[in-house]
Amino acid sequence: MMTADHRKQVPILILGGTGEARQLAQQLNTWPALAVTLSLAGRTAQPQLPQGGRLHVRTGGFGGVEGLSDHLRRQGVRVLIDATHPFAARMSAHAILAARLADVPLLAIDRPAWPRESGDRWIEVPDMAGAAAALGEAPQTVFLAIGRQEVAPFRRAPQHRYIVRSIEPVAQDALPPGATAVLARGPFAEADERRLFEMHGVTVIVAKNSGGAATYGKIAAARGLDLPVVMVQRPSVDAAGHAPDMTVPDADAALSALRVLLPHLSAPDDRGE
């Protein structure tokens, strides 16, 4: 049952799964005027969570756009924050459409993509199928830094030797034949990435252009070793031409935006609904 103090709080829902989401939730959890919920997709069995007793964490999907919009209404959410991964385009599209249906402001954190720098040998491709094709026919030692959900397309290029790094194990039926699995959670320093590439004799890296500092070490190490990077570009967000109400590059900017926005909002009990 809600307490009187809880009813006076402004409900905030953060769609998370990223470092920015954790950082933002950690900061907002100290704001007594807020009731913060961090929502995780549930794809990672042991996710890193912010510290703090008041923060509520929910796991699992909402049931599409209608399910998310219904959740926003039922919970009286006053601000929706999309802090999902840059490659979670479907979830971002759902957030935009659901926020419009529920008439809730949407603040999105759009982490800047990595720019190509002098010395980078990038082969830019639109998706994982394109990345597998870009490896060519000649056998190579490929470092896959793409997580565990999108490894299967590389089974179509079994001539290569794969080093697959992920936080949790990749399903055996998705791994290319003879792949070496490396379980690790970032951040990854450039020097450590360089040693890893040299130890395994890596000749090419496949990466998503996720942006951010936590996993940039592999890009810097590839540049230093003069290794090519097959860089998968970010997917576009198809939200029927709609966009978030506000977009910021990081958690600090999101905090600043919320400081401006929140004084204009009230808790659900004070809205006359």
Image: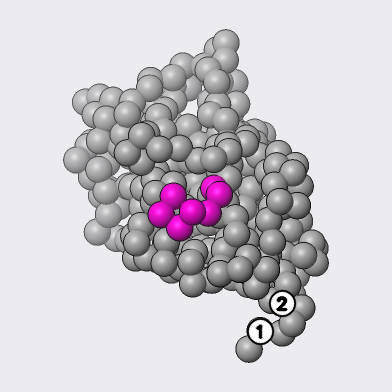
Magenta span covers which residues?
100-106
In this picture, residue 268 sits left or right of residue 123: right
Furthest residue toward top? 118
Residue 16 at x, y = what percent? 55, 56
Residue 71 visible in image: yes
In this picture, residue 107 sits left or right of residue 230: right
Please name whichever residue, 59 or 144, is drawn nearer the observer in this view of the structure. 59
> Which numbered tag is attached to residue 55?
none
Task: Give the residue drawn at x 67%, y 68%.
Answer: 270
The secondary element bearing badge 1 is classed as loop
Pointer 2 and pointer 1: residues touching (CB < 8 Å)?
Answer: yes
Residue 149 drawn in magenta? no
Kind of residue sitting beneath label 1? Met
Task: Give the residue drawn at x 60%, y 26%.
Answer: 220
Image quadrant holding the C terminus, namely: bottom right
What's the distance in space between the residues labelled 2 and 1, CA to CA? 6 Å
Instruction: Report crowding for label 1: few under 14, some 14 to 19, many 20 or more residues within 10 A (C-alpha).
Output: few
Vertical order, 250 against 75 (above or below): above
Task: Give the residue drawn at x 32%, y 39%.
Answer: 240
Quadrant of residue 191 within the rendered picture: top right
Instruction: Report crowding for label 2: few under 14, some 14 to 19, many 20 or more residues within 10 A (C-alpha).
Output: some
Applied colour scheme: one colour
Residue 38 at x, y = what percent? 59, 63
Residue 55 at x, y = what percent? 68, 70
The secondary element bearing badge 2 is classed as helix
Please name whichever residue, 245 or 171, is drawn nearer the observer in this view of the structure. 245
Furthest residue toward bottom? 1
Residue 51 visible in image: no
Residue 192 at x, y = what percent? 64, 39
Kind of residue sitting beneath label 2? His
The residue beneath circle 2 is 6
The residue beneath circle 1 is 2
